[in-house]
Image: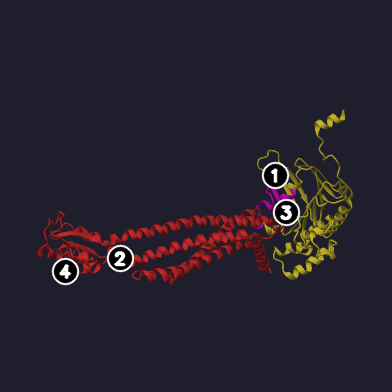
Chain colours: A red, B yellow
Amino acid sequence: MRFGLIMSEVGQGLRRNFSMVVSVVLVTFISLTFVGTAILLQMQINEMKGYWYDRAQVAVYMCTATTDTANCNMTEATEEQKAAVASKLESSELAPLVNEYEFETHEEAYEKYVEFTDSAEADYITPEFLPETFWVNMVDPTQSGVLIETLSGTPGVDEVADQRKYLDPIFDALNAASYTAIGIAALMLVAAVLLIATTIRLSAFSRRRELGIMRLVGASNRFIQTPFILEGVIAGVIGAALAGGATVAVVHFFVQGYLAETMVATSFVGLEEAAVVAPILLAVGIVLAAISANVAISRYLKV
Amino acid sequence: MIRFDQVTKLYAGTTRPALNSVTLEILRGEFVFLVGASGSGKSSFLRLILKEENPTKGEIHVLGQNVGRLSSRKVPYFRRNLGVVFQDFRLLPQKSVFDNVAFSLQVIGKSKGFIQEAVPDVLKMVGLAGKASRFPHELSGGEQQRVAIARAIVNRPALLLADEPTGNLDPATSAGIMTLLERISQSGTTVIMATHDAGIVDQMQRRVIELVAGQIVRDERQGGYLTQAIPVQKGFGSEAAQ
């Protein structure tokens, strides 16, 4: 009986304020889509970091006869110097940090070079121009600083470089994009909350006669406020459901359907991640709508 | 039933109290007229009983409850024991007579069965038995006020507050409303009615409480309206006397 009465009040409120309800749905939809995108971007960044950081190595470039840095002075690294680097990598300080390492000769470097560049250019390069290199896989990629510090300046070593530094700009760009999305989402959510509050106030104003009589005859506060809160929550839920659907659609059609096809080497977020994001959006939508509607209606409940 | 103990009500931003140290007691089943000029504190008196306002000083007991100590969560349940009628009826225009009365029962959670039984009963009592499906705009002023009274008493309150219930009605219709209020009073309900209608007060010969500038200047059983409550503007009055 009371449930039916409350639901009929809710239906009445939604119908009377139809255009406002539609705008609440749209604003909630868009803002929560931004929230969902931001969450997915963060997930994507973590996934890519895990993938690439595992493959990133520290390169210890040895001197060649054409390297003119102070440490090399145009002298090819000697066999003793190479052995010294190898023994340092196996020494008690560095061995626990190093997962494995391999030595790349001039010829191997040249083969790799030819493979990745067109032949016309390769004609001018001889194997001697390309440095011999120790490729080191770290146990923990973040510990590369120790390796760089220990090996830089060792006789015969030209440069110690962490490949991760080439990846960082990419992650910085992705991070900036996700923070931008979060910023826009926050602004839009503020707009959504204010819009819900305004809509509920309008709804209450259009029913102020009923509200006055309800208060007079002793309807409990909960009974009076429930229809309004439900009104806000229903609009919020519709917006959040649309946002969840949009997020899943973006992952399915854009990320999996387009990006994953074109960039085969990278792993992308999938529908499992989207399935995590959608309930979060729904919860955020419900909680925000309920809180803002509750605050908006409380003014009408003061006795 | 109702006890005011040194009650003062001062609205924020004013220096003259709406009620000034009012002490009185109203017993169960009494019929009380509250008279006085506009602004003398009649409405404040009724609003304090309803706990729409809180007293600045003093204590108010209504139906055995200390109204000042009532938490705002309990106010709705307290109000279920009171019925209120206004000069402007305050009916819901898009609801029928039956639904207007039923609404006040629905929102306090009464069962459908109870409503189906109580509403026709009360409509019969106020003399609107055949008009349950009419809408407020199809009724005369007197009939609309009867609907409002039906709504106020359908939950069988111990106390009925009426703020100038005949203020918008002609004398003949007013007399009908007064007969109805008297009948309600005879069934044991305490009735407090604020009014300007001298004819009614003089004719009914009930307890009269007269307020002037927030103070009780008269409280007599079987009183009349008297006219001293009408303020005479000094400058204008003395000029007229010359």
**Foreground tag (2 vs 1):** 2
Between the residue at mark 3 and the residue at mark 2, the CA separation in whole angstroms equals: 76 Å
Badge 4 and badge 3 both on one subunit:
no
Q: Amino acid at mark 2?
A: Tyr
Q: State the mark number for residue B9.
A: 1
Label pair 4/1, CB-CB below 8 angstroms: no
Q: Chain of mark 1?
A: B
Residue B111: give x, y in percent of width and height.
72, 69
Q: Secondary structure at mark 4?
A: helix
Residue range in magenta is: B45-74
Separation of disc 4 and disc 1 at Cα? 101 Å
Q: Secondary structure at mark 2?
A: helix
Residue A112, picture quadrant: bottom left
A191 and B71: which is toward the camera: A191
Rendered position, B215 above or below A149: above
Q: Are tags 3 and 2 found on a single chain?
A: no
Q: Tell me the distance, in whole angstroms, between the alpha carbons under discs 4 and 3.
A: 103 Å
Q: Residue furthest top?
A: B242
What element does badge 1 sit on?
strand
